[in-house]
Amino acid sequence: MPNNVCSKRPRLTQACMAVGLLVATLWSSATWADEYADVNRLLKSGQSIEAMAKVDQFLASKPRDPQMRFLKGVILAETGKANEAIGTFVKLTEEYPELPEPYNNLAVLYAGQSQFDKARVALEMAIRTNPSYATAHENLGDVYAKLASQAYSKALQLDGTNAGVPPKLALIRNLFSPETRPGKSAPANAQTPAPAAAAVARPAAPTTPSPAQASTAGTADGSEEVVSSVQAWAKAWASKDMGGYLGAYSDKFDPPGQQSRKSWENERRDRIVSKRSINVDVSDFDVKMSDGKATVSFRQIYKAGALVANSRKTLEMTRQGNRWLITRESSGG
Protein backbone atom coordinates (compact mmCIF):
# COMPACT_ATOMS: atom_id res chain seq x y z
CA MET A 1 0.00 0.00 0.00
CA PRO A 2 1.38 3.47 -0.86
CA ASN A 3 2.46 5.54 2.09
CA ASN A 4 0.70 8.73 1.01
CA VAL A 5 -2.96 8.52 1.94
CA CYS A 6 -3.87 11.66 0.02
CA SER A 7 -2.47 10.32 -3.25
CA LYS A 8 -4.71 7.24 -3.03
CA ARG A 9 -7.85 8.63 -1.45
CA PRO A 10 -9.53 11.36 -3.51
CA ARG A 11 -12.13 11.78 -0.81
CA LEU A 12 -9.38 12.83 1.57
CA THR A 13 -7.82 15.11 -1.03
CA GLN A 14 -11.14 16.75 -1.84
CA ALA A 15 -11.97 17.12 1.82
CA CYS A 16 -8.64 18.76 2.51
CA MET A 17 -9.19 21.24 -0.31
CA ALA A 18 -12.59 22.09 1.11
CA VAL A 19 -10.86 23.75 4.06
CA GLY A 20 -10.48 26.83 1.88
CA LEU A 21 -14.21 27.43 2.10
CA LEU A 22 -13.99 27.46 5.88
CA VAL A 23 -10.94 29.70 5.94
CA ALA A 24 -12.90 32.19 3.87
CA THR A 25 -15.34 32.62 6.74
CA LEU A 26 -13.02 32.06 9.70
CA TRP A 27 -10.25 34.51 8.93
CA SER A 28 -11.89 37.28 6.95
CA SER A 29 -10.65 40.83 7.26
CA ALA A 30 -12.05 43.60 5.10
CA THR A 31 -8.93 45.70 5.67
CA TRP A 32 -6.59 43.21 4.02
CA ALA A 33 -9.03 41.47 1.67
CA ASP A 34 -7.25 42.69 -1.48
CA GLU A 35 -3.89 41.34 -0.29
CA TYR A 36 -5.38 37.92 0.49
CA ALA A 37 -7.18 37.85 -2.85
CA ASP A 38 -3.98 38.72 -4.73
CA VAL A 39 -2.08 35.87 -3.09
CA ASN A 40 -4.89 33.43 -3.83
CA ARG A 41 -5.00 34.56 -7.45
CA LEU A 42 -1.26 33.98 -7.83
CA LEU A 43 -1.59 30.54 -6.20
CA LYS A 44 -4.41 29.51 -8.50
CA SER A 45 -2.38 30.55 -11.55
CA GLY A 46 0.63 28.53 -10.37
CA GLN A 47 2.79 31.57 -9.59
CA SER A 48 4.09 30.30 -6.26
CA ILE A 49 7.27 32.41 -6.24
CA GLU A 50 5.31 35.61 -6.80
CA ALA A 51 2.73 34.56 -4.20
CA MET A 52 5.44 33.92 -1.60
CA ALA A 53 7.07 37.28 -2.32
CA LYS A 54 3.76 39.01 -1.68
CA VAL A 55 3.19 37.01 1.52
CA ASP A 56 6.66 37.86 2.86
CA GLN A 57 6.15 41.53 2.05
CA PHE A 58 2.85 41.55 3.93
CA LEU A 59 4.22 39.68 6.95
CA ALA A 60 7.19 42.02 7.23
CA SER A 61 4.83 44.65 8.64
CA LYS A 62 2.12 42.36 10.08
CA PRO A 63 3.99 39.25 11.24
CA ARG A 64 1.15 37.84 13.40
CA ASP A 65 -1.57 37.91 10.76
CA PRO A 66 -3.04 34.36 10.88
CA GLN A 67 -4.52 34.13 7.39
CA MET A 68 -1.39 35.26 5.58
CA ARG A 69 0.69 32.87 7.67
CA PHE A 70 -1.77 30.11 6.76
CA LEU A 71 -1.28 31.01 3.09
CA LYS A 72 2.47 30.86 3.58
CA GLY A 73 2.12 27.32 4.93
CA VAL A 74 0.09 26.37 1.86
CA ILE A 75 2.70 27.80 -0.50
CA LEU A 76 5.53 26.03 1.34
CA ALA A 77 3.71 22.71 1.06
CA GLU A 78 2.86 23.17 -2.60
CA THR A 79 6.49 23.94 -3.40
CA GLY A 80 7.71 20.76 -1.71
CA LYS A 81 8.88 22.32 1.56
CA ALA A 82 6.76 20.11 3.77
CA ASN A 83 8.86 20.47 6.93
CA GLU A 84 8.77 24.26 6.74
CA ALA A 85 5.02 24.10 6.13
CA ILE A 86 4.63 21.87 9.18
CA GLY A 87 6.55 24.39 11.27
CA THR A 88 4.25 27.16 10.06
CA PHE A 89 1.06 25.26 10.89
CA VAL A 90 2.42 24.09 14.27
CA LYS A 91 3.07 27.72 15.22
CA LEU A 92 -0.46 28.68 14.19
CA THR A 93 -1.95 25.91 16.36
CA GLU A 94 0.10 27.16 19.31
CA GLU A 95 -0.94 30.79 18.91
CA TYR A 96 -4.52 30.23 17.73
CA PRO A 97 -5.61 26.92 19.29
CA GLU A 98 -9.28 27.77 18.76
CA LEU A 99 -8.98 27.42 14.97
CA PRO A 100 -9.36 23.87 13.57
CA GLU A 101 -8.06 24.44 10.02
CA PRO A 102 -4.32 24.59 10.86
CA TYR A 103 -4.67 21.30 12.76
CA ASN A 104 -6.30 19.69 9.73
CA ASN A 105 -3.66 20.86 7.26
CA LEU A 106 -0.94 19.85 9.68
CA ALA A 107 -2.46 16.38 9.86
CA VAL A 108 -2.55 16.03 6.09
CA LEU A 109 1.13 16.94 5.88
CA TYR A 110 1.96 14.39 8.56
CA ALA A 111 -0.03 11.78 6.64
CA GLY A 112 1.97 12.62 3.53
CA GLN A 113 5.10 11.71 5.52
CA SER A 114 3.50 8.51 6.86
CA GLN A 115 3.48 9.97 10.39
CA PHE A 116 -0.03 8.70 10.98
CA ASP A 117 0.04 8.86 14.78
CA LYS A 118 0.88 12.57 14.60
CA ALA A 119 -1.82 13.02 11.97
CA ARG A 120 -4.34 11.33 14.26
CA VAL A 121 -3.49 13.60 17.19
CA ALA A 122 -3.74 16.73 15.04
CA LEU A 123 -7.12 15.70 13.64
CA GLU A 124 -8.45 14.87 17.09
CA MET A 125 -7.45 18.39 18.16
CA ALA A 126 -9.26 19.84 15.14
CA ILE A 127 -12.41 17.95 16.11
CA ARG A 128 -12.09 18.90 19.75
CA THR A 129 -11.90 22.55 18.68
CA ASN A 130 -14.86 22.20 16.32
CA PRO A 131 -16.88 18.99 16.75
CA SER A 132 -18.95 19.79 13.63
CA TYR A 133 -15.86 19.97 11.35
CA ALA A 134 -16.83 17.26 8.84
CA THR A 135 -13.54 17.48 6.90
CA ALA A 136 -11.51 16.54 9.96
CA HIS A 137 -13.87 13.67 10.81
CA GLU A 138 -13.48 12.22 7.31
CA ASN A 139 -9.71 12.64 7.35
CA LEU A 140 -9.51 11.00 10.77
CA GLY A 141 -11.41 8.01 9.43
CA ASP A 142 -8.86 7.60 6.64
CA VAL A 143 -5.97 7.93 9.07
CA TYR A 144 -7.51 5.29 11.35
CA ALA A 145 -7.80 2.99 8.33
CA LYS A 146 -4.14 3.51 7.49
CA LEU A 147 -3.12 2.80 11.09
CA ALA A 148 -5.24 -0.35 11.01
CA SER A 149 -3.46 -1.47 7.84
CA GLN A 150 -0.07 -1.03 9.49
CA ALA A 151 -1.21 -2.94 12.58
CA TYR A 152 -2.60 -5.84 10.54
CA SER A 153 0.59 -6.01 8.47
CA LYS A 154 2.67 -6.15 11.63
CA ALA A 155 0.44 -8.87 13.08
CA LEU A 156 0.88 -10.92 9.92
CA GLN A 157 4.66 -10.53 10.10
CA LEU A 158 4.67 -11.74 13.69
CA ASP A 159 2.29 -14.63 13.08
CA GLY A 160 1.90 -15.68 9.46
CA THR A 161 -0.40 -18.55 10.46
CA ASN A 162 -3.16 -16.28 11.77
CA ALA A 163 -5.91 -16.86 9.22
CA GLY A 164 -8.03 -14.00 10.54
CA VAL A 165 -5.62 -11.23 9.58
CA PRO A 166 -5.38 -11.47 5.74
CA PRO A 167 -9.11 -10.82 5.12
CA LYS A 168 -8.99 -7.73 7.32
CA LEU A 169 -5.85 -6.48 5.60
CA ALA A 170 -7.40 -7.09 2.18
CA LEU A 171 -10.49 -5.12 3.22
CA ILE A 172 -8.40 -2.11 4.23
CA ARG A 173 -6.30 -2.29 1.06
CA ASN A 174 -9.44 -2.45 -1.03
CA LEU A 175 -10.65 0.72 0.69
CA PHE A 176 -7.63 2.59 -0.64
CA SER A 177 -7.50 0.99 -4.07
CA PRO A 178 -8.29 3.03 -7.23
CA GLU A 179 -11.22 0.72 -8.03
CA THR A 180 -13.10 1.96 -4.96
CA ARG A 181 -12.89 5.61 -5.94
CA PRO A 182 -16.25 7.31 -6.50
CA GLY A 183 -17.21 8.41 -10.02
CA LYS A 184 -15.68 7.41 -13.34
CA SER A 185 -12.28 5.80 -13.58
CA ALA A 186 -9.43 8.12 -14.50
CA PRO A 187 -7.82 7.64 -17.93
CA ALA A 188 -4.63 5.62 -18.01
CA ASN A 189 -2.47 8.67 -18.68
CA ALA A 190 -4.02 10.79 -15.93
CA GLN A 191 -1.47 12.38 -13.60
CA THR A 192 -1.71 12.02 -9.85
CA PRO A 193 -1.21 15.35 -8.07
CA ALA A 194 2.09 15.74 -6.27
CA PRO A 195 1.70 14.86 -2.56
CA ALA A 196 2.24 18.41 -1.31
CA ALA A 197 -0.27 19.91 -3.74
CA ALA A 198 -2.86 17.24 -3.06
CA ALA A 199 -2.41 17.24 0.67
CA VAL A 200 -2.96 20.87 1.58
CA ALA A 201 -5.98 23.10 1.34
CA ARG A 202 -5.83 26.30 -0.65
CA PRO A 203 -7.74 29.10 1.09
CA ALA A 204 -10.26 31.06 -0.92
CA ALA A 205 -10.39 34.84 -0.97
CA PRO A 206 -11.71 36.13 2.38
CA THR A 207 -15.12 37.65 2.54
CA THR A 208 -16.93 39.69 5.14
CA PRO A 209 -20.72 40.06 5.14
CA SER A 210 -21.80 43.64 4.65
CA PRO A 211 -24.24 45.31 7.05
CA ALA A 212 -26.88 45.03 4.34
CA GLN A 213 -26.61 41.24 4.54
CA ALA A 214 -27.44 41.19 8.26
CA SER A 215 -31.04 40.52 9.14
CA THR A 216 -33.20 39.59 12.06
CA ALA A 217 -35.18 36.97 10.21
CA GLY A 218 -37.08 34.64 12.47
CA THR A 219 -37.37 36.98 15.45
CA ALA A 220 -41.16 36.88 15.45
CA ASP A 221 -43.50 34.52 17.30
CA GLY A 222 -41.66 34.65 20.62
CA SER A 223 -38.21 33.99 19.19
CA GLU A 224 -37.15 37.51 20.23
CA GLU A 225 -36.36 36.01 23.63
CA VAL A 226 -34.05 33.47 22.00
CA VAL A 227 -32.19 36.22 20.13
CA SER A 228 -31.93 38.28 23.32
CA SER A 229 -30.46 35.28 25.14
CA VAL A 230 -27.85 34.81 22.41
CA GLN A 231 -26.96 38.50 22.54
CA ALA A 232 -26.59 38.32 26.33
CA TRP A 233 -24.37 35.23 25.97
CA ALA A 234 -22.15 37.05 23.45
CA LYS A 235 -21.96 40.12 25.69
CA ALA A 236 -20.93 38.02 28.71
CA TRP A 237 -18.27 36.30 26.58
CA ALA A 238 -16.86 39.61 25.32
CA SER A 239 -16.77 41.13 28.81
CA LYS A 240 -15.18 37.93 30.22
CA ASP A 241 -18.09 37.60 32.64
CA MET A 242 -17.61 33.90 33.28
CA GLY A 243 -20.63 33.62 35.53
CA GLY A 244 -22.91 35.02 32.86
CA TYR A 245 -21.18 33.13 30.05
CA LEU A 246 -21.19 29.68 31.67
CA GLY A 247 -24.61 30.35 33.14
CA ALA A 248 -25.97 30.58 29.58
CA TYR A 249 -25.44 26.82 29.20
CA SER A 250 -27.99 24.29 30.35
CA ASP A 251 -27.06 21.54 32.80
CA LYS A 252 -27.92 19.27 29.86
CA PHE A 253 -25.29 20.89 27.63
CA ASP A 254 -23.25 18.38 25.62
CA PRO A 255 -19.57 19.49 25.74
CA PRO A 256 -17.50 18.84 22.58
CA GLY A 257 -15.06 15.98 22.25
CA GLN A 258 -16.61 13.85 25.01
CA GLN A 259 -15.24 16.20 27.64
CA SER A 260 -16.72 16.35 31.10
CA ARG A 261 -18.66 19.49 31.93
CA LYS A 262 -16.05 20.50 34.49
CA SER A 263 -13.05 20.09 32.15
CA TRP A 264 -14.90 21.98 29.41
CA GLU A 265 -15.69 24.86 31.79
CA ASN A 266 -12.06 24.99 32.98
CA GLU A 267 -10.80 25.05 29.41
CA ARG A 268 -13.23 27.81 28.38
CA ARG A 269 -12.36 29.85 31.47
CA ASP A 270 -8.62 29.58 30.74
CA ARG A 271 -9.04 30.58 27.10
CA ILE A 272 -11.38 33.49 27.72
CA VAL A 273 -9.75 35.04 30.78
CA SER A 274 -6.27 34.83 29.23
CA LYS A 275 -7.26 37.13 26.33
CA ARG A 276 -6.35 40.79 26.70
CA SER A 277 -9.54 41.88 24.97
CA ILE A 278 -12.44 40.14 23.24
CA ASN A 279 -15.16 41.37 20.93
CA VAL A 280 -18.08 39.15 19.86
CA ASP A 281 -20.59 40.48 17.33
CA VAL A 282 -23.68 38.39 16.50
CA SER A 283 -26.12 39.13 13.68
CA ASP A 284 -28.16 37.67 10.80
CA PHE A 285 -30.29 35.44 13.06
CA ASP A 286 -32.39 32.53 11.84
CA VAL A 287 -34.54 31.00 14.59
CA LYS A 288 -36.61 27.82 14.39
CA MET A 289 -38.96 27.09 17.30
CA SER A 290 -40.59 23.80 18.30
CA ASP A 291 -42.13 22.58 21.59
CA GLY A 292 -40.07 24.63 24.03
CA LYS A 293 -36.88 24.17 22.00
CA ALA A 294 -35.12 26.47 19.57
CA THR A 295 -32.38 26.20 16.99
CA VAL A 296 -30.77 29.52 16.20
CA SER A 297 -28.07 30.09 13.60
CA PHE A 298 -26.30 33.42 13.19
CA ARG A 299 -23.19 35.18 11.96
CA GLN A 300 -20.51 35.48 14.65
CA ILE A 301 -17.50 37.77 14.30
CA TYR A 302 -14.97 37.07 17.02
CA LYS A 303 -11.98 39.35 17.58
CA ALA A 304 -9.16 38.80 20.05
CA GLY A 305 -5.88 40.61 19.47
CA ALA A 306 -4.77 40.03 15.88
CA LEU A 307 -7.27 37.23 15.35
CA VAL A 308 -10.49 37.88 13.46
CA ALA A 309 -12.78 34.85 13.12
CA ASN A 310 -15.91 35.29 11.02
CA SER A 311 -18.07 32.17 11.00
CA ARG A 312 -21.60 30.85 11.04
CA LYS A 313 -22.68 29.44 14.40
CA THR A 314 -25.64 27.33 15.50
CA LEU A 315 -26.98 26.97 19.04
CA GLU A 316 -29.62 24.50 20.16
CA MET A 317 -31.50 25.92 23.12
CA THR A 318 -34.21 24.84 25.50
CA ARG A 319 -36.53 26.86 27.68
CA GLN A 320 -35.95 26.34 31.40
CA GLY A 321 -38.26 28.48 33.53
CA ASN A 322 -38.11 31.95 32.00
CA ARG A 323 -34.70 31.47 30.38
CA TRP A 324 -33.41 30.03 27.12
CA LEU A 325 -30.27 27.96 27.77
CA ILE A 326 -27.78 26.36 25.38
CA THR A 327 -27.79 22.57 25.09
CA ARG A 328 -25.55 22.20 22.02
CA GLU A 329 -23.36 24.41 19.81
CA SER A 330 -21.57 24.01 16.50
CA SER A 331 -19.68 26.18 14.03
CA GLY A 332 -19.48 26.29 10.25
CA GLY A 333 -21.97 25.95 7.47
Image (tube, rainbow, N blue to C red):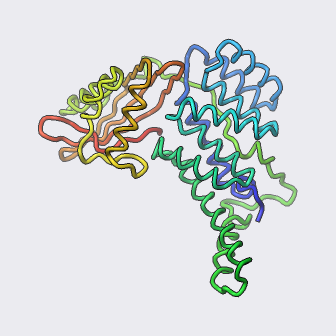
Q: Is residue 149 above or below residue 225?
A: below
Asked where in the image residue 229 lies, by quadrant, the reply is top left
138 lies left or right of 178: left
Asked where in the image residue 262 lies, by quadrant, the reply is top left
Work out which quarter of the rendered image holds the N terminus and state it: bottom right
Front residue of 177/155: it is 155
182 lies left or right of 188: left
Q: Which residue is depicted at the point 26% across and 34% down?
A: 248
Q: Is residue 162 above or below residue 211?
A: below
Instruction: Please provide percent x and percent y for residue 316.
Output: 30, 42
Q: Is residue 260 above or below residue 42?
A: below
Counting labels gives 0
Q: Which residue is depicted at the point 73% across and 21% down?
A: 55
Q: Is residue 33 above or below residue 185?
A: above
Instruction: Please provide percent x and percent y for residue 137.
Output: 53, 52
Front residue of 70/42: it is 70
257 lies left or right of 3: left
Name, please, the residue furthest toward the right: 189
Instruction: Please provide percent x and percent y for residue 2.
Output: 78, 61
Front residue of 68/22: it is 68
Instruction: Please provide percent x and percent y for residue 275.
Output: 44, 23
Q: Which residue is depicted at the point 18% across and 47% down?
A: 291
143 lies left or right of 153: left
